[in-house]
Amino acid sequence: MLGHLSFGVSNLARTTAFYDASMAALGYARVFTGPEYVGYGLSGTERDNLLLILQPKPVTPPGPGFHLAFIAPSREAVDRFHVAALQFGGVDQGAPGLRLHYGPTYYAAFVLDPDGYKLEATHQAPERV
């Protein structure tokens, strides 16, 4: 449904370090770099799903109710995402764990990136029939 999302960022070097680490933990990669932007997507492609653009004005993330969720290939990847995000300037908004109110296999972690965007990494195991 979505082609990509673009976020304005205040410090491209800090943002790149954060997203290089947190996206790698989920199996994603930086797919291109420009003087004022970086793009992330599936490794081995040039298609970005997340574009981060340096902004000359103050950055204001969306308010309550907005967050961006990334699909993780495993619970361990969710754990690695959370560790990497916190190591590179993220703020904890919910440690890795089951979120039973979303479903019996919904495993997720939440962080704020260095500009305050709320991010989630989630893995949902297939339900057994």
Image (tube, helix red, strand yellow):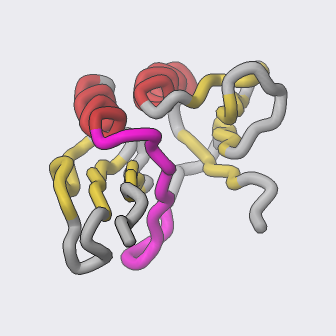
Tell me if residue 83 comes above or below residue 101 in the rendering: above
Q: Position of residue 84 (x, y in %)?
A: 31, 26
Q: Position of residue 9 (x, y in %)?
A: 56, 41
Q: Is residue 55 left or right of residue 48?
A: left
Please indicate, yes or no, whether residue 89 appears anywhere in the rendered image: no
Q: Is residue 129 left or right of residue 93?
A: right
Task: Tell me if residue 33 is in the magenta stretch.
Answer: no
Residue at x-position 30% and y-position 75%:
103
Q: Nearer the viewer, residue 74 or 66?
A: 74
Q: Quadrant of residue 55?
A: top right
Q: Which residues are magenta?
A: 61-75
Q: Position of residue 108 (x, y in %)?
A: 29, 55
Q: Nearer the viewer, residue 37 or 28?
A: 28
Task: Tell me if residue 64 is in the magenta stretch.
Answer: yes
Residue at x-position 38% and y-position 43%:
113
* Residue sitting at the far front: 129
Quadrant of the frame with the C terminus:
bottom left
Q: Nearer the viewer, residue 22 or 128?
A: 128
Q: Nearer the viewer, residue 22 or 11?
A: 22
Prevailing secondary structure class for the magenta stretch in the rendered image: loop
Please indicate, yes or no, whether residue 28 appears anywhere in the rendered image: yes
How many circles with numbers are drawn on the protein?
A: 0
